Each structure stands twice: as C-alpha cells, then as structure tokens.
Image (cartoon, rainbow, N blue to C red):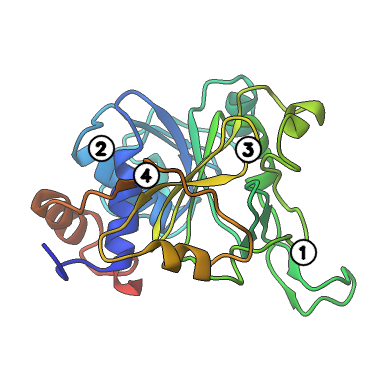
Amino acid sequence: MENTYNPMELMITIAARNLEDGAMVVVGTGVPVAAAMLAQMTQSPNLTILFEAGGIAPLLPTMPISVGDSRTTHKGLKATSMAEIMELCQAGIVDYCFLGGAQIDKYGNLNSTLIGDNYEKPKTRFPGSGGANDLASLCWKTMVVTPQNKKRFANKVDFVTTPGFIEGGTSRVDAGLPANTGPYKVITDIGVYGYHPDSKAMMLLSLHPGKTIDDVKANAEFEVIIPDNYETTVEPSELELKLLREKVDPSGVIIGRG
C-alpha cells in the first residue's frame, strides 16, 4: 500500500486504533473527532464520545465543525455543559483525551499559549488552554497527534499550558495531580511515542514505514529514547482508508491537510 495514503490519514488511523471498544474519550474537532468516528466504524462500536461543550455519546451523522456544533448532540445521551464534562473527568470515568499544541517537551508538557520568553510581549500568542489543562490533569490518558519537527518537539516549552509528567519521575504526582494519569502516546508523521515507565521521558514505540531513526533524531530538540525493540507501524488498511475518505471526511477537510 506504499504511497496510497498521506501522513494525516496515517496519523488519524493510528489514533483510532488506540481507542478500544467501551472506552470514553473527550475529543475536539478536527483530527480527534475523525479518529473517534473511525474507531466507532471499525473496532470500537461502543466507544463513548464526549465534547467539551457538553455533548455526550452522540451518533455523529457527519463531522462537526466545532465542539458546540449541534451535531455533537445528535441522537446523544445528553446535551449538558462544559462543567459537567469536566466533572466526569474529575470523577475518573473518562479514559482518553486528545490534545495538541505549538510545543511539546520530552515529558509531555504542552504549550498552546505563546512563543517567546516575555509573557506580556511574546513573539507569537496562541489561544491558550481552553479546557486542555483540565483534561490533561484529570483524564487517565492523554494522546497528542501532531506533525513532528524541532520547533514542536522542543527541549523546553516556552510556557507550560498543560502539564505532562512535568519534570519526569514522580513530579506529576508530587505536584498533586491524580496518580496513574498523564501523557500516554504521541502520534506524529514519523512515529508513535510513549513514555519510559520510570523516567517518564519520551520513548519511541513504533517507526512509520519509510522513516528512519535519523528522522526521529533530526526532528526533535531533545533526545528521544530509542529502545532495542521498537516496532514498525502497521499501515492503514483498505477498509480504514475507505471509511475515512467516504464516511468520516468525504470533503477532505481534515485528511486533505496531509
């Protein structure tokens, strides 16, 4: 299947495969909702999707354009509020959340606030946290889907919008965040990454077909842990691509970015 899919289609497919049947996931628009929809159409028909603005367990007819889109409550269990969604996360019943950002460091800390060292006069200002800090602090597992380059994979984020494993080791729990929560996987156009069980530093799990370890090293400011037993990413199947292109995103709004 070489050259029959683009990097965005690959990343969405991998993200979908990580959402098991019966799980609960808070998603935003774009890549996260595409991954959740694809998961429901393949291995996880009982995946429960939640939207930050209050939609719970909708049967999405088409891809919503915002977290407050009316489609996020279509045939759903409940149309509630952001407060209740965050309460569900705080109660410990939400398995996954998807996040992104301008920068991520080796411990999974995310920056979606600014670039530069002066908060009042940054080089670039971004939208900020939204609900990202709450979600990553309270959900069991945080997944990030992002293109990989040195600017994004920063040695130190310019602003910690969203805590990951903070300074590694036990620092996340020491800071008062719930035990056994935090960064889970980072899915990029080069590979899939997890975190070392002790140091909590980012570690390669699988390398995409056609990519090399040199690609990993050249596109990260920090040193990614390269274990001896990393895998090769399984390419998208014909069925996954067909569903993604014909059912999930037939207009190519998201997958067209690849």
Residue at 19%, 38% in the rendered image: 42
Q: Residues within 10 Å of mark 2 (few under 14, many from 20)?
A: many
Nearer-N-terminus badge (3/1) = 1
Residue designated by label 3: 200
Residue designated by label 1: 158
Secondary structure at badge 4 equals loop
Measured in 3D between alpha carbons, the distance from the residue under mark 4 to the one under mark 1, in whole angstroms, is 30 Å
Nearer-N-terminus badge (2/3) = 2
Relative to 123, say whether 2 is above or below: above
Residue sticking out furthest to the front: 228
Nearer-N-terminus badge (4/1) = 1
Amino acid beneath label 1? Asp
Residue 121, image x and y in percent?
87, 77
Residue 60 in view: no
Which of discs 2 and 3 lies nearer the camera? The answer is 3
Measured in 3D between alpha carbons, the distance from the residue under mark 4 to the one under mark 2, in whole angstroms, is 28 Å
Amino acid beneath label 2? Gln
Residue designated by label 4: 230
Instruction: For the N terminus, give its image quadrant.
Output: bottom left
Which of discs 3 and 4 lies nearer the camera? The answer is 4
Measured in 3D between alpha carbons, the distance from the residue under mark 3 to the one under mark 4, in whole angstroms, is 17 Å
Tag 2 and tag 3, C-beta contact below 8 Å: no
Residue at 76%, 53% in the rendered image: 160
Amino acid beneath label 4? Tyr
Tag 4 and tag 1, C-beta contact below 8 Å: no
Residue at 85%, 71% in the rendered image: 117
Residue designated by label 2: 40
Q: Residues within 10 Å of mark 1 (few under 14, many from 20)?
A: many
